Image (spheres, helix red, strand yellow):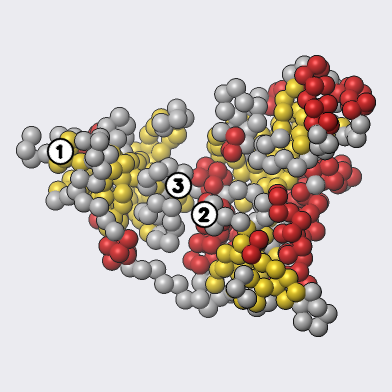
Amino acid sequence: MSNKIIVGSEEWCALPGLGIKAVKARVDSGAKTSSLHAINISTFKREDGTWVCYEVHPLQGSRKVTLQCESKLIDRRVVKSSNGETEKRFVVREQLHLGEQSWEIELTLTNRANMGYRMLLGREAMGQKILVDPSATCCLGEMSAEQVDEFYGKLVVPSSGLKIGLLASNPDLYSNKRIMEAGQQRGHEMYFLNVKQCYMKLDASEPEVHYRGGRILNDLDAVIPRIRPSMTFYGCALTRHFESLGVMALNNSEAITQSRDKLFSLQLLQKNNLDIPTSGFANSPADTTDLIDMVGGAPLIVKLLEGTQGKGVVLAETRKAAESVINAFKSLKANLLVQEFIKEAQGKDLRCFVIDGKIVASIERTAAPGEFRANIHQGGTASIVQVTPEEKKLAIKAAKTMGLQVAGVDIIRSSKGPLLLEINSSPGLEGIEAATGIDVAASMIDSIEKKLGWKK
């Protein structure tokens, strides 16, 4: 007993064979298998068998430290995660260094970007060497940011690239942090610009964009608008002003404006012969009955035109409920769409991430139990999906119709074939990067580089 290591619910450890000098692990005796965060996993052959190469970002919430790792493959195993989903993972064996002791453990490789820790230490790896005190943390010592910097070296990327501004509201959102990191990793000067803190000078001879404190932003090479719906008018005016200065916008103001107007975007899609769910729009509550019949009756979907992330979307299961919801929204002078309910979709939809006319990643989103909206923000889950050629063509043409260089295209599978639900001009990255392991943020930066003819 005296020889056992006493650890808390989380501990700093190392995997020296992979060059991982420090990684904070979740110690979980309830989990059988240990796992390590890994992306871009592929196999290759050597004389002694099959090996896997993969990328590891050992520091939670950051990709600034990227390690290229190789391990001999010892197995492929089906693992059940804490949320009940199963996944087939590569299994490797590496030396674990914990406290003053080292021993070999098995690790499964999986994308843990959306988990609390980049490594999970399960009971098989603990063996007879560890005692867990679940009420304690870091019994073997906490590690400061300065100590971590000493291990990995403070990342200094030469800023010899482009000057890129990210127009958004919250610097702590996953998507915004990832875009900033992706640009910095490629050597660009990245600036987070709060939309509310930007203001414009309209002048025929010297037009300018200023940032709070007086800094002039005319020298930017590109901007990436990530404008929240409540800031659409001002954010698009700001993007338009940058465009007038010759600053490239990854999604221009016109494309963002029309994609944010749900009614106009559906009309554009319809005009270009793209399949959409049957929808109805009316101004007066007096037309409610005909509006319901127009989309095939109940059950049906009622959508606020200003809604986003699944908010302002209601499933009316009966005609009476539909009439009540529609009339209630109308009494508040809210603009709404009535749309047919695709029952056979069973609470699932597809999100295709389109950049420059190509699908770079796609996922299937599944609604939470008891919920009909598959949005990740509404508790939905994401998994990798293979889209059909028809779905691929639909997504690409939808983004092109909207004029969007970057788009999240939502498709639902119906008995009539794939139908377009919505085109998002500021699609989130967290769900799709976590599910697929694809560096979508880097693809966005790559798009800017190509359009501006920049080479490292």
Residue nearer the viewer, 151 or 56: 151
The quadrant in which the C terminus is found is bottom right
Amino acid under disc 3: Ala
Amino acid under disc 2: Asp
Does the image show residue 32? no
Q: CA distance from mark 3 to mark 2?
A: 15 Å
In the rendered view, would you say 284 is above or below 68? above
Residue nearer the viewer, 436 or 289: 289
Q: x, y (%) of residue 326? A: 81, 27
| Crowd around label 3: few <14 · some 14–19 · many ≥20 (10 Å) | many
Nearer the observer: mark 1 or 2; the answer is: 2
- In what element is the residue under mark 3? loop
| Crowd around label 1: few <14 · some 14–19 · many ≥20 (10 Å) | few
**Which residue is identified by label 1?**
129
Does the image show residue 173? yes
**Which residue is identified by label 2?**
172
Please tell me which of labels 3 and 1 falls first in the chain: 3
Residue under the point 56% across and 45% down: 432
Please tell me which of labels 1 and 2 falls first in the chain: 1
The quadrant in which the N terminus is found is top left
**Which residue is identified by label 3?**
113
Q: x, y (%) of residue 9? A: 27, 39
Tag 3 and tag 2, C-beta contact below 8 Å: no
Q: CA distance from mark 3 to mark 1?
A: 28 Å
Residue under the point 66% across and 61% down: 196
